[in-house]
Image (cartoon, rainbow, N blue to C red):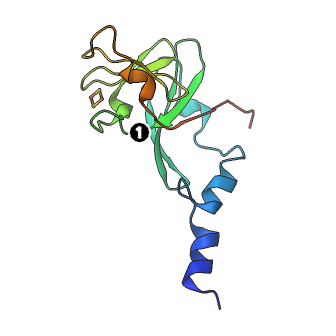
Amino acid sequence: MLTEEQNDLITRTGPGTPGGDLLRRYWQPVALAEELPHGGAPIPVRILGEDLVLYRGDSGALGLIGLHCPHRGADLSYGRIEGDALRCLYHGWLMGKDGKCLEQPGEPAASNYKDRIKHPGYPAARRPG
Ligand code: FES
């Protein structure tokens, strides 16, 4: 019989858990290609206990980043695709497909606050099925 601790060790897959860290080293299927047509809206996905948003940028590149905006937590699946980035519709932060914050319209031009923002971003690619 497993202890509660052993059970958690082998069943928890969220960010920062041993199982989650292991599984994040491997490709995971998150959506079907037809769910993300060119020009289509971003879609929320939940994988390994983490809420993410998947989108196809204007170049066709896929982005898979945290669902909730690092500013005030708005749902980025309602965001607007700009190039290969995703703009939050609440206050306009622009998030790159690697999770980097690229723009913060409300910040002074000389501010480097965006460089200190940490947001989940994972590689995403289409694989033939
Ligand atoms: S909540 Fe996204 S920019 Fe403010």
Image point 60% across, 37% down: which residue? 32
Q: Is residue 94 visible?
A: no
Determine which quarter of the picture holds residue 79: top left
Identify whether 27 is placed above or below 125.
Answer: below
Image point 45% across, 23% down: which residue? 115
Determine which quarter of the picture holds residue 90: top left
* x and y, in percent, of residue 22 in the image: 69, 55
Image point 33% across, 30% down: which residue? 78
Identify whether 11 is placed above or below 35.
Answer: below
Instruction: Report the label total.
Output: 1
Residue tagged 1: 67
Asked whether mark 1 and ligand 1 are closer than 8 Å, the reply comes as no
Identify whether 56 is placed above or below 8.
Answer: above
Task: Categorize mark 1 by other alpha carbons within 10 Å: few (<14), some (14-19), many (20+).
Answer: many
Q: Is residue 6 left or right of residue 66?
A: right
Quarter of the figure that contains the C terminus: top right
Identify whether 81 is placed above or below 18.
Answer: above
Quadrant where ligand 1 appears: top left
Q: Is residue 13 visible?
A: yes
Amino acid of disc 1: Leu
